[in-house]
Image (cartoon, grey):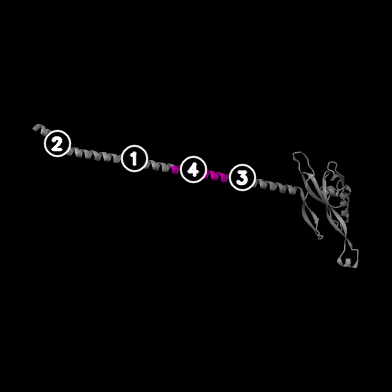
Amino acid sequence: MKGILNVVLPLVVFEPVSGFLLLRSKRQISFQHRHNTKLQLIGKSDDTNNANVNTGAENFLEKARRLREEVEEIESQKKEESYKKQLIQEKDERQEREEYLRYSAEVPILKSDGEEVMERVQFMPRLKKGEDGSELSQIITVQAPLPLGIILGESEELPGLTLVDEIAEGSNGELAGVKVGDLLRACTACQVSMEMPTWQLMAGGIGRPKTSRMMFSTDGKQFDEVMGALISNQMDPKGRPVWLVLERFD
């Protein structure tokens, strides 16, 4: 029994204490183990959150970058479209300007105060050749003294218009640059009117004749009227050359 007690005694004496300590130690270890696990879990959760935050930030930045690129592309397209519209507008304006210059001419215009000034007048084109408009006409002006030495005729293809049928060799018209086939669009013409000063009007006078020169459009005029307008330049007291506005193909 004593031997048994000796054997058991350590168990009785030390086992509870040791067991308690051991249990306590185990509990402590177990607690520490659970605590470490919790810390590890918390650490992993924080890393995951940080990774998610970083990923979200990167996604946001990527979306912002794409949005900025889309905005820049839209702005670039707008600028390009605006530039194209500007080019088209400038081209149209240039074509309009070229067409205006092609079908216009500076001629002497008589004003209401009796002064004669040079102004650019536009003429609608009458000559057309080719369905595609590959051959264009133009308006030109020439000045030539009388007699002109040209023979005019009525156009059969263009009723109401007057053409140059023949030109005498070495004539004033030929020297001025008139060509057969030219379409006469306008010419200078002289007109006589009675000028009556106020004192003559009060005295019952009849006034005095005054000759004025003006531009005469030949479009749609009778052939006799056109010839009369040309011949009237003989009445010009200043003896100035006759102005002829002609349309011809280039």
Q: What is the magenta range?
A: 56-77
Label 2 neighbourhood size at 10 Å, few (<14), some (14-19), many (20+)? Answer: few
Q: Which residue is mark 1?
A: 41
Q: Earlier in the sequence, mark 1 or mark 4?
A: 1
SS for dot 4: helix
Q: Which residue is mark 4?
A: 63
CA–CA distance in space, label 1 to label 4: 32 Å
Q: Nearer the viewer, residue 86 or 65?
A: 65
**Label 3 close to label 4 by CB (< 8 Å):** no
SS for dot 3: helix
**Label 2 close to label 1 by CB (< 8 Å):** no
In the rendered structure, which amino acid carries the disc numbered 3? Answer: Glu
CA–CA distance in space, label 4 to label 2: 74 Å
Q: Is residue 70 magenta?
A: yes
**Residue 38 visible:** yes
Q: Which residue is mark 2?
A: 12
Q: Is residue 210 above or below residue 133?
A: below
